[in-house]
Each structure stands twice: as C-alpha cells, then as structure tokens.
Image (tube, helix red, strand yellow):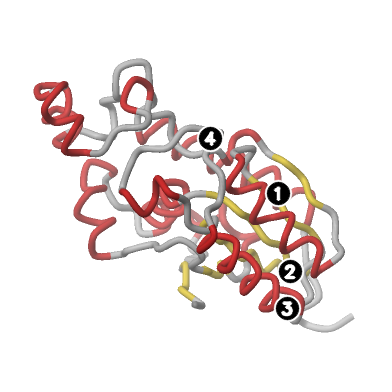
Amino acid sequence: MGRFDHRLSLFLVRHGSTKDSEEKRYSGSETSLNRNGEVEAHKLAEVFAKTGIVRIHSSPYARAIETARIIQDACRCPLEIINELSEVNHGQWTGYTAGEIKRTWKEEFALRGKYPKTTSPPDGETLEQLQERTLNALREIIEVDKQGKALVVTHGGNIHTLWMFLLNSDLNNFWGFSKTHEIKCGDIFLLENAENLFKTRNGVLLSLTKVR
C-alpha cells in the first residue's frame, strides 16, 4: 500500500448565504438558504464533484442540510446528519442583530463580549460548549471515515472554534480572532492528516487552510 493510503483529508464548509446572514442576524435552526445561498451551494457542488469525497457530514440546521444535499446530488456519496455540528445556540438572542441585542440586553451583551468562553446568551450556549461538541463530532467522523476525503457542512462558529483549538488560542479572544480570520458563507477549508487531530499533544501539529 502507498505511503498516503491511511491519511484523511477533511474539508469543512460554511453553509450558503441566508437572509439572516446577509442582515447579520443570529439565526436559529430553521433558517433556509436564500437565492444567493443556493447559487453558492451549487458552486460548492461543482468543486466537490471533482474532489472525490467519500462522505458528507452535516449540521442538522436547515441551511446546512440544504447546502449538503445540493453537494450530495453532485457527488453521489452518503450524507450523515450530526447534531453536534449545529451552530452555537443563541438562546433568547435568536433572530436579532448585535445592535438590537445591545439595546435590550446591554449588560449581558457586554459580559459575553469580554468572556465568550464561559458566558452564554440567556438560555443559550457558551463558546466552550460549542467547541467541545464540535470536537466530539469531529472525533466521531474521524473514527468512521479513517482515510480518503470527507466533507463537513457546518457553521462559522464551529469552524472558528476548531481553528482556535488548532492554534491553542483562548476562546475569550474569539471576537478579535473571527474578525482577522473571517469565514464567509460558502468558504472552504481543508484539514489535512485529520486522523491526527487529537494527537497534537504528542507533537503532531495540524493547520486549517482556506481553500476558497
């Protein structure tokens, strides 16, 4: 067998655009792709039809599943829905813009701005919780796929917290990090040698590379 036969290339994609993403609103689970998002998803399908992916894993949120199914139609490979790949739960802030939230939940918004790692929106999740379940989902994916090329369709927050894990970056720096490492709808990232994701403490260092 060849030298590279047991390596796993894991592609990560942020779902296509939605009305909420274009208005910069915190979305819930039912937000669907808009026309721009559908166009972006079909462009992603063109890319991955040529990539040779063996499996697609998706967040259960509507916009992610819609993106994943458009790609699946082009790639004709299995699609698995993984609940832990869902976006961070925005709780009572779902449907609002940051400006609207700041006016209604001024103190809570300021606290989350300083300590997002351990501070959640009312009835929502912390970034620490988001990162933990995202990593748990990736651990399951790696155990199943083992080698070849696989695709994960998820959300900006999930990809950002994975990126920060790889860089050993403090989640309380999330807002600055997300500005300097912007992730747009339809962006593609590649994690090569993903089978080593949880071996970084043993000297195996991985990086997340933006493909498009």
Q: Is mark 3 on a helix, strand or loop?
A: loop
**Residue 94 position within the rendered picture, expressed as x and y whole percent measured from the top left:** 37, 29
Q: What element carries label 4?
A: helix
Query: Vertically, is 64 above or below 120?
Result: below
Between the residue at mark 2 and the residue at mark 1, the CA separation in whole angstroms equals 11 Å
Q: Do the residues labelled 2 and 3 touch (CB within 8 Å)?
A: yes
Q: What residue type is labelled 3?
A: Thr
Query: Vertically, is 104 above or below 73?
Result: above
Between the residue at mark 2 and the residue at mark 4, the CA separation in whole angstroms equals 22 Å
Front: mark 3 or 4:
3
Left or right placement of residue 17 versus residue 143 in this view? left
Query: Vertically, is 61 above or below 13?
Result: above
Q: Which amino acid does label 2 sit on?
A: Lys
Q: What residue type is labelled 4?
A: Arg
State the residue position of label 4.
133
Decide: few, some or many residues near mark 1? Use Cα within 10 Å; few <14, some 14-19, many ≥20. Answer: many
Check the image and name the residue furthest to the right: 1
Q: Which amino acid does label 1 sit on?
A: Ile
**Residue 139 position within the rendered picture, expressed as x and y whole percent measured from the top left:** 64, 45
State the residue position of label 2.
149
Between the residue at mark 2 and the residue at mark 3, the CA separation in whole angstroms equals 8 Å
